[in-house]
Structure formats: structure tokens, C-alpha cells
Amino acid sequence: MIVMKLSQVPNKTTGNGIKIFCYLCFIVSCYLIFLRFEVALSQQPEPQPLAGFTVESVIPDNQLDKNQTYFYLGVQPSNQQIIQVKIRSLQKEPVTVALSIHDAVNGTEGQIDYTQTSPKLDSSLTNSITQIVHLQNKEATVTVKNFEEKIVNYEIKIPKEPFSGVKLGALRFIKQLEDESLTSNQFTSTYAYTISVMLTEDKQPFDEGAELQLKKVGTTISAGQPVVQVTYQNRQPKVMKEATITNWLTKKGQTKELLKKVQADVTVAPNSLLAMDLPLNDVVLPAGTYTVHSQVSAGNREWQWRKDFTITQTQIKQWSTNTPSAKRQPFLLVGSSAMVLVVVSIYFYLKKSRTK
């Protein structure tokens, strides 16, 4: 015989209370989840429409590698040359394409970046691609429609002073937005194509001879989060490929690793600066002096450095007020407090209902 205690018999009041409790917990949980992820969600772009166009490089006779679709050209001092790119419409409706030329720099994830419009160039770089390559007709856009094809001409003017190694950059083709009312504060999606341009006079291997030097170490805000940033310099007009960079952080004079990051398959642009981030994540670093240990390997070559730097109380205070996670803390505190109050209130309400 199974005996059920009176307190176990669900009455109507208790059942409704449990339903209310579950419902409120669900609402408050959703609220907290929204607060936690609202910044990330606001940064997600909408699904992109079809580009409506495509591009194709017209490979000239002085192309050094005929198997590549980017421009890898052997040039001579004071020479001039026209290179061409076909822009082909893929739809009846007109598409306007913005044309731009960019120098090769480095992103923080270890890949060459051709998207920056006014990047900080290294002091070792002279006569960059944007100084050598220009649009022939100076038009910044081209419009194609109804499956037609147009050719864009670029003029290359090689300086009279000889250069060694390579000059690296890219041609960019970006679909213009139809709605010009969109502001810079709105996240929008665009289609873009990139064709690299690499020029050489000595025709030596472009990926042999790069040399890294440790330039500086410090803290900064990257992608909204505090990081230790290690900056290297490649003063050579050569590309470094398939490098592995390992950075770790210790207190000065100690060996315990506080932070560590290994980045593989790193590519470094010629004559460029490379900034690698070491995220703090949830590690709390008090003010003091620290040591960054850095190791880079590429092929059969290897470099190692150690460099001290100081984190001040002022920097820590700036992190706590200027990062998105810090700005969310008051909202999270309010939400958490609200949830605790709801749970406690429902608990006493149910307890009182059972007593009755």
C-alpha cells in the first residue's frame, strides 16, 4: 500500500504556483541570455544577396607563374605597363562596382590583409603598390548589366630606382550598396573580390629571406577586449609563409605561464608590421612588471625573444570601463539580482500555499 503524505498532494494553488515559478524563471533566464549575447548578435551581418558580377584577371606575357590567376609580374626600372581585369555581369539588373587598390599589410590573426584603405605602412617600405599601380581612367566605379562584360585598365609605372624582392598589394572590387541612406553605424553586407598584385625585378623566390624582429610589447584593446600585443617587423621585401608563432606571458623573474597562444600557418607581408594578440580572456592581471616570451619558426629558421613591460593601475581601470564585457556588468548584476528575488519570492509563496 502506497501512502501519500498530505504535503505531496498537489492542490490547485500549488500547481499554479509551480507553473508561475517555471514561467518566471524562463523569462528571467532569457533576459540574462539576451544581456550576455546582445553585443555579439548586433554584430552579425544579414545574409548576403548574390553578388551579381564576377571578375577575371587578364594574364599578360610577363606573368612569372602562368598557373596563378593573380598578377605575379616580372618588371624593369622605369617600365610602364597596362594590366586588365574583366568585370562580367551575372544578371539583367545593373550592378555598380567600386574599384580600389590596396597595399598588403597584416591582420592580427596571422594572414595578409588587403582590405585596409589607409593602413599604417612600415618605415622600411618604399614605393608601395598604391604608388606604382593606378586606375588608367581615374574612374572609381564601373557599372555592368544584362550579362555584359567590361574591361578595367590599370597602369603600372615602375620607379627608375631599382628594388629588390617584391612589392605586394591587391585590386579590390566591391559591390556598391543600392540604398545610399545606410549610415556607417549600420552593419551591412557586401560582396567583394580581390586580385593580388606582386611585382619583382630580380625574379628571386618571393618567399625566401623574410626576417622578423621583435618591435614592441604592450597592452591594448583589440576587438573590444584587453590583450597583450606583440608587434614584429619584417624589414625584408619578402613574404614569410607557414610560420608558427608562440607567445606566452609570465611575471618578471618567474616561470609560471599566465597566458599562452600558439598561432600556426602565419603569413607575413613584405616590409610590414605584424601585431599578434595574446588575449587576457578571464585571467586577471594585477599591476606589475611582466615578461613576454616569443618564439617564431618558419621552415628551418627560428627566432626567440624575451621582453619586459609594465601594466599600470590606470590601464586596468581603463579596461574595466572601456570593454563591452565590462559595460555589460551592471546589466548582468541587475538581471541576476532580479532572478534571485523572483526565486526567493516564489519559494516563500509556495511554502505558504502548502501550509494552508
Image (tube, rainbow, N blue to C red):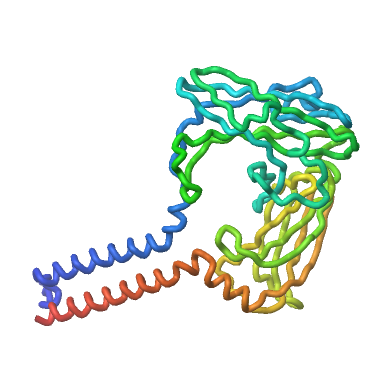
Q: Is residue 94 visible?
A: yes
The answer to which of 280 and 311 lies nearer the viewer is 311
For the C terminus, the image quarter is bottom left
Quadrant of the rendered structure where residue 171 is?
A: top right
Q: How many marks?
A: 0
Quadrant of the rendered structure where residue 135 is?
A: top right
* Location of residue 132 with respect to 312 vertically, above or below: above
The answer to which of 94 and 292 lies nearer the viewer is 94
Q: Is 105 displayed left or right of 221 in the figure?
A: right
| Residue at x 53% of width, y 66% of height | 323
* Location of residue 123 with respect to 189 vertically, above or below: below
Q: Is 229 displayed left or right of 347 in the figure?
A: right
Q: Is 209 displayed left or right of 54 in the figure?
A: right
| Residue 143: percent from left, percent from top | 54, 25
* Location of residue 178 with respect to 144 vertically, above or below: below
* Location of residue 160 with respect to 122 vertically, above or below: above
| Residue 194: percent from left, percent from top | 64, 34
The answer to which of 152 and 217 lies nearer the viewer is 152
| Residue at x 77% of width, y 49% of height | 272
Q: Please identify the residue farthest to the front as the structure is shown.
A: 138
| Residue 154: percent from left, percent from top | 71, 27
The answer to which of 93 and 6 lies nearer the viewer is 93
| Residue 249: percent from left, percent from top | 69, 69
Q: Is residue 2 visible?
A: no
For the N terminus, the image quarter is bottom left
